[in-house]
Amino acid sequence: MAVAERSVAEKADFKRELTEVVPHLRAFARGLCGRPDMADDLVQETMLKAWAAQERFEPGTSMRAWTFVILRNAYLTDMRRNRFRGDYDETVAEKVLTAPAGQEEPIHLSDMHRALLTLPPERREALLLVGAGGFSYEEAAQICGCAVGTIKSRVGRARATLNDMLAEGNIPQRSVDDDTAHRAILEELDDVASGKSESAKP
Amino acid sequence: MTSGKKPTLGKEDDQPSVSSGKQGQQPQWADGLKQLYDAVVDEPLPDSFKDLLSQLDDKSSDESSQN
């Protein structure tokens, strides 16, 4: 369809805003797919897609939200093509997050990351958007193209799962590329991609 | 703002991005999520990204002439 060509100034604005969100795209992608190299590939893919689609960006709206939509769609597509296997990022620092009372081992940032990567993708992205990216539920719902209630429920479930893992010291080892888990993830992805997912469930 | 909603997540309509010191309702590890995210945001941008950004202007003319 015919979209108005952007002026040079508008393109410059777009580029500046796009540049500003790149670190956020990298952070979101890293949380989604774990491996930094793959995450960065995904971000570059996103930047190119965003640039090519810039006529569809409404100036004055959130560039971060707009590019996150592109990134998540690229991620879902790549996931289905089996490019990401939920590999664990070995470079996450073994930094102590918190040491719950009565637990022998403190929780490390790497534990957190590993636990995060075991979540089903739709819950992981919801938690990342709200709990890490600081988006409101409403914004996260728009990014994921689902109802606000769905996002709330996904975030709630994700938190509960992480809480079980982290508070109980029940953190999975680096076996997230385990076949069964992977198949489950892919099945969920099909649901996400086809737009049904949890919103259709009670 | 506080219209009879459950108080479990105190300020769900506000932007939680600006480090509000809200605690109590969040588990201890919740801050770790932000730490994971912010650690990447704060990383210096690899050169490959700067290269890509500087190539974008050329790309747009390619795209519009080819598409």
Image: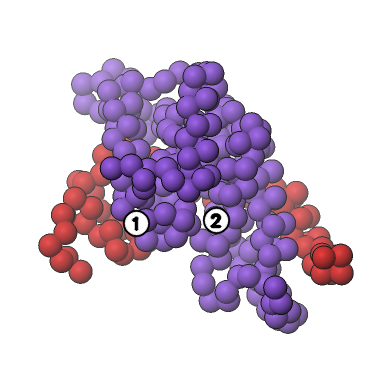
Chain colours: A purple, B red
Judge from the rendering whether residue A172 lies leftward or rightward of residue A1; answer left or right: left
Judge from the rendering whether residue A153 lies leftward or rightward of residue B67; answer left or right: left
Label 2's element?
A: helix
Q: Is residue A110 above or below residue A102?
A: below
Residue B11 place in picture, x, y as percent: 25, 60
Asked if labels 2 and 1 share a chain, the reply is yes
Residue A36 place in picture, x, y as percent: 62, 37
Sort mark 1 into few (<14), some (14-19) or many (20+) by Cα contacts within 10 Å. Answer: some
What kind of residue is marked 2?
Val
Q: Is residue A34 above or below residue A149?
A: above
Q: Is residue A131 visible?
A: no
- Residue A137: which quarter of the image? bottom left
Q: Residue, x 48% and y 48% (percent of image)?
A: A195
Residue assigned mark 1? A148
Q: Could you say which is closer to the camera, residue B55 or residue A82?
A: A82
Residue assigned mark 2? A69
Q: Is residue B22 above or below residue A63?
A: above
Sort mark 2 into few (<14), some (14-19) or many (20+) by Cα contacts within 10 Å. Answer: some
Judge from the rendering whether residue A22 lies leftward or rightward of residue B12; answer left or right: right
Quarter placement of the C terminus of chain A? top left
Q: Is residue A7 above or below residue A53?
A: below
- Residue B56: which quarter of the image? bottom right
Label 1's element?
A: helix
Q: Residue, x 23% and y 53% (percent of image)?
A: B9
* Measured Cα–Cα span from mark 2 to mark 1: 16 Å
Mark 1, chain letter? A
Judge from the rendering whether residue A197 lies leftward or rightward of residue A9; answer left or right: left
Residue A108 place in picture, x, y as percent: 40, 29
